[in-house]
Image: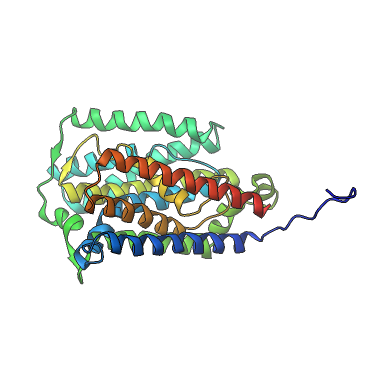
Amino acid sequence: MANGIASPQLKVHPVVLTIWRQAGVATALVLLVVVASFLSDRFLTVPNLLNVLRQVSIVGILAVGMTFVILTKGIDLSVGSILGVSVVLFAGLLETGSMATAIPLGIAAAMVLGLINGLGVAFAGIPPFIMTLGMLSFARGIAFIYTGGTPIPILDEGFYNLGNGYIVGIPIPTLILFAVLIVSGLVLGKTAFGRSVYAIGSNEDAARLSGVPVKFYTALVYVISGGVAGIAGLVYASQLSVGTPIAGQTYELDAIAAVVVGGTSLFGGRGSVLGTFIGTLIIGVLANILNLMGVDPFVQQLFKGALIVVAVFIMTRSDRSGR
């Protein structure tokens, strides 16, 4: 304030801010790729790049579902455990049945667990952190009870090909990730439900007064997150050909990291699945180049943690400038 007159604050339109964020994370990815290409001559080889895409597919799929939840100002700490439930169900159902029954039932079970999360958050008023933290333990318990703590081998060759095969030279897990990204992007960008998700995250009370069924849509984003976790579980189980009850442990942290690095606001209402995909690639490329350079896996965790802190710092600053 000068001479008793308040200085006007520059306000940035949310759409402009979202584009700015996406441009920023895309630039960061390009710079990281350039640096990686100088650090290792193996980085830009086609086999290595396809390997990066295959490696990020599971976390990338999980992160898409997490984007829906975070856009509503929520959080889902249970996606790793829900993935684990779907993995053991795929394995168990394939022992006595076929892919035609195992895949739909495994994904449906994941959606049911997501629905429980949604009902607890939207209708029972339980904070998302607490509700999904409880589901993290509950779902993991289901996986251990179902298997008795013993991994279930998967012998179906067709199922194995889902996680390890190629179509026109592209890994099938990568194609599954692209399909999830495209569908989710269309839902968020082209439907009334997608616009409502952004509205709920931006101002829940205003969204309710505008006629948005806030509780129903809030519950629905957790169902989506659970279903997407089931799809990620499909890729996980088919890649490893084993149903282990520890599948997906700590994957929820990687998914949240990808969403945050991709520029989605933890305060809700701002972000996109495109940004999440770029964030997933940033983390994947960073891990890949550290592996190529022979960096100790424990040291790699330091880099990942620092990346997340920096991303949240930048995001928080940009949120303040947009108000």
Q: Is residue 155 left or right of residue 73?
A: left
**Residue 110 or 315: which is nearer the viewer?**
315
Q: How many marks?
A: 0
**Residue 110 or 281: which is nearer the viewer?**
281
**From where the camera sits, is residue 67 visible?**
yes
Q: Is residue 202 left or right of residue 188?
A: right
User: What colouring style does the render use?
Assistant: rainbow
212, above or below 50, in the image: above
**From where the camera sits, is residue 192 visible?**
no
Q: Residue at x 25, y 41 (%)?
A: 297
Q: Residue at x 50, y 35 (%)?
A: 128
Residue situated furthest front in the rendering: 38
Residue 270: image location, x then y, percent: 56, 54
Residue situated furthest right in the rendering: 3
Q: Residue at x 60, y 52 (%)?
A: 318
Q: Quadrant of residue 158?
A: bottom left
Residue 31: image location, x then y, percent: 40, 62
31, above or below 149, in the image: below
77, above or below 42, in the image: above
Residue situated furthest bottom in the rendering: 168
222, above or below 47, in the image: above
Q: Residue at x 40, y 32 (%)?
A: 135
Residue 107: image location, x then y, percent: 31, 47
**Residue 301 or 209: which is nearer the viewer?**
301
Q: Is residue 318 left or right of residue 50?
A: right
